[in-house]
Image (cartoon, rainbow, N blue to C red):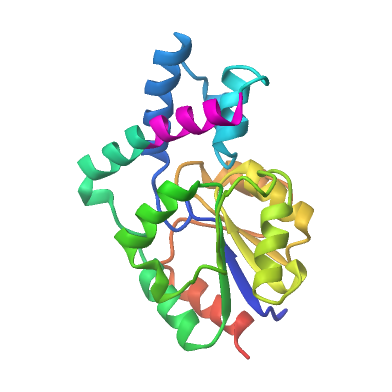
Amino acid sequence: MKKFKGIIFDFNGTLFFDTEQHEQAWREYVRDLCGRDITEDEFRYSIHGRTNADILRYFLHNGLTEREIERHSEAKEEVYRRLCMKQSDKLHLADGAYELLDKLKAAGVRMAVATSSGRSNTQFYIKRFDLWRWFNQNTFIYNDGSIAGKPEPDIYLTAAEMIGLEPSECVIFEDMPSGIEAAVAAGAGRIIAVASSLSHEFLASVGGVDEVISDFTDEKFIDRLMESVSK
């Protein structure tokens, strides 16, 4: 079995299954803003995994000022967080994620998060899920406006650097094509797709994916993963 030294997680749709809430928030916001509905292909290729700035430029125009982007972005995220709080029964990490993160930390495995989420949502997640149990300010990489969004590889390159590894030494978990493309471009050692909203069959067909899982509860998968990253 090939050995790896670290793990990098995407967050939304990977550690936290919130695709439904994000899609609903974007539907409401774009309908009010543009007077039209979003197609499934737009969700798959132009929204999920991408920064709010890229999404807003797609639906509006490239001439948006930074202040306009910030205003629209925060307005949309307020809708999203409201939806999350209304569905409190879903406001938890993916099944098995708590246990896996505890095992990885206990084993001394280097870990990072690389998410397209912005600062306000990141603060929401940190507080709600007590994420500093496993990560810190250096290993929870989010969209602060200085890193190119997925499918560019920059956020995964940055995350690997922050844990002192090459991407080829890391297992990367992703749930969307744009993120998988970013992981491939970064040179990930292994890519695990999480079928939180897209089908196993579709994700297995995406170039670069080594394995597809539903969540983090499969004990045989967890055992294999731990063996691959154990020192």
Verify whether residue 105 appears in magenta: no
Give residue 42's position: percent from left, percent from top: 57, 25
Height in image: 57 above or below 215?
Answer: above
Q: Give the range drawn in magenta.
A: 65-77
Left or right placement of residue 217 versus residue 178 in this view: left
At horizontal 47% and vertical 82% (from top left) the residue drawn is 105
User: Which residue corresponds to the image point at 57% horizontal and 49% vertical from the top-left?
Assistant: 143
Q: Quadrant of the C terminus?
A: bottom right
Looking at the figure, which quarter contains the N terminus?
bottom right
Q: Where is residue 185 in the image (x, y as percent from the top left)?
A: 78, 52
Drawn side of residue 229 relative to residue 148, left or right: left
The overriding secondary structure of the stretch rendered in magenta is: helix
Q: How many labels does the image show?
A: 0
The answer to whether residue 170 is visible is yes
Quadrant of the rendered structure where residue 65 is?
top right
Above-or-below relation of 9 to 52: below
Residue lying at 46% horizontally and 87% vertically, measured from the top left: 106
On the image, the x and y values in percent for residue 44 come to 57, 33
Rendered location of residue 220, percent (x, y) = 48, 75
